[in-house]
Image: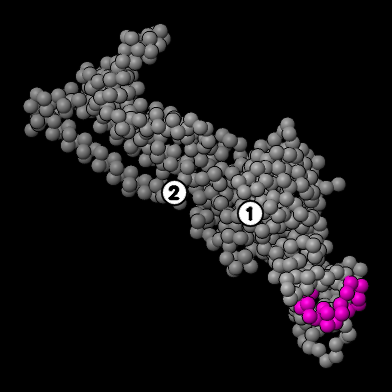
Amino acid sequence: MTILDPADLQAVWLTLKLASVSTLLLLLIATPLAWWLAQSGKWYKGAVAAVVALPLVIPPTVLGFYLLLLMGPHGVVGDLTTALNLGRLPFTFAGLVVGSVLFSLPFAVQPIQNAFESMGRRPLEVAATLRANMWDRFVSVALPLARPGFLTAIILAFAHTVGEFGVVLMLGGNIPGETRVLSVAIYNHVEAMEYGPAHWLAGGMVLFSFIVLLSLYLVGGKLWRVSK
Amino acid sequence: MSWIRAHLKMQLDSFALDAAFSAPPVGVTALFGPSGSGKTTLLRCIAGLERAQGSLHVNGELWQDEKTFMPVHRRPMGYVFQEASLFPHLSVRANLEYGLKRIPQAERKVQLEQVAEWLGLSRLIDRRDPAQLSGGERQRVAIGRALLTSPRILLMDEPLSALDTTSKQEILPYLERLHRELNIPVLYVSHALDEVARLADHLVLLEKGRVIASGALGETLARLDLPTAHFDDAGAVIEAVVAQHDEKYHLSKLDFPGGHLWVGKVEQPFGTGVRARVLARDVSIATQAPQGSSINNILNARIEEIRDEGPDKVIVRMQVGDANMLLSRITRRSRDHLGLVAGMYVCAQVKSVALM
């Protein structure tokens, strides 16, 4: 068996970094979005929910293709980032983050939204009668009661980003240290018939995923059941 | 001046709520009506949990009118829901302290220990998980949690209806105690007449979203034009004081203006106020004082009004003394046989008295 070379380790590190940054951003975006979807009675709520759920059904390559166009030299987002002196996003780590966030959005929004919806209006009403203002109610009641939903969202978003391939390939290509994540590295090894390192990386990914899930189930068992 | 003045309107699925009422600044005002009469909705509107049209003044303070709407968390009230709705992620103590922490120090009129003592919670306060409490215990914690915000009014939405009979019996004495010891007016939603007769001082009667009557409990329950007089457990309420104990026969005498009632021994000192409920079906009428009757309580009464109630029954309202009313449900045949009419003096035979 071949030991992993520094390039592979770099890919592992990059993948973890991408997944962490994306998950963090997803939490920041998905929480208010899920709250709004759970609370709102607006007529266009259905349309918003459908757009959020789109990445579940469209192929990653399609999503990546459109993102590439949007963020490229002739795209709206591309013009914007250029105007802001940020350069263009495709083939950069930042571009991957944008792609991952969009791609994993439903996996973060839906568990949180479900958690908000399943707690019902009552706990928030109770908090209001106990003098808590809206922000206070959200922080002191809604967030803690939705903890199982957040945990699920974190796991799903993180795992989904780690395993992503199509969007990365369309959007980020294969630049070592910048956009070459694990899944791409494995693909490269297989293309080059280097099954040894491919095994190491693929097997490591399986083991890592299993350990993450297992530890969450074991350690977080109580957290999952916090609200019945 | 009334403490609460409300005229609230709201379109609901099945009917329109259009309720105008006022309530006194003391005691318990019951919002009473059948299921679907809008009483819970009305209470939620008063709390600001539903947004109704109209106006609402509490204690001279404007809570709502066409232009203003005071948000729920600004209204100085306590609200007890039908289910205890304790926060599952907080300990019992943290539940109790939730509202307490959110009001300024200067406005805190009651302390945690005090409320815990009142509601018999001292033993429960250090439990971590509120889910382990019994139904009655949970509801007591919910009441304590509301009281700790030092509310100027307490709104209670059928706080007993989700409980089994045992828990109900366990919690009622606490409610009565609050009633006696706390000087906060209470709005109490209920569809159970016995609960209302036990706890309320003032009655607001709702039907299909409208207030059909409002007044002092005793007077209102004795009105034959209202549906409450025609319930199976219709009856009168008499406020009396413990006057005498008969140790030999284990009985107590309760005095009220206009007469007295002998009841099973009350373990209370002389002068204690008690509320007695006499059901219409437990009162029979004689035109002369009966001889050789086993019935202990025979009161002189004057017939005020008689109303037909179905094909075979009539309900009779009688006045005892200057202020107290009695209801009696008898057959139409008895009425005709005895020739009962309004204005007649009769003997009301009371077969049983329930102490509240």
Give x and y (percent) for residue A195: 9, 30
Q: Chain of mark 2?
A: A
Can residue A206 be seen? yes
The stretch drawn in magenta includes residue B280: no
Which of A9 and A162 lies nearest the eye of the viewer? A162
Instruction: Tell me if mark 2 has few (under 14), some (14-19) or many (20+) residues whose alpha carbon lies within 10 angstroms of its own.
Output: some
Which of A140 and B164 lies nearest the eye of the viewer? B164
Kind of residue at disc 1: Gly
Q: Residue at x 81, y 41 (%)?
A: B60
Q: Which residue is mark 1?
A: B36
Relative to A36, residue A90 above or below: above
| Span highlighted in magenta in the image | B326-347
Q: Choose top left, top right, bottom left or bottom right for residue B349.
A: bottom right
Viewer-nearest of discs 1 and 2: 1
Q: Residue at x 14, y 24 (%)?
A: A188
Kind of residue at disc 2: Val
Which of A128 and B67 lies nearest the eye of the viewer? B67
The stretch drawn in magenta includes residue B333: yes
Relative to B24, residue B308 above or below: below
Label 1 residue SS: loop
Q: Residue at x 76, y 81 (%)?
A: B351
Give x and y (percent) for residue A61: 25, 24
Q: Residue at x 29, y 40 (%)?
A: A212
The N terminus of chain A is located in which quarter?
Answer: top left
Mark 1–mark 2 CB contact (< 8 Å): no
Q: Which residue is mark 2?
A: A226
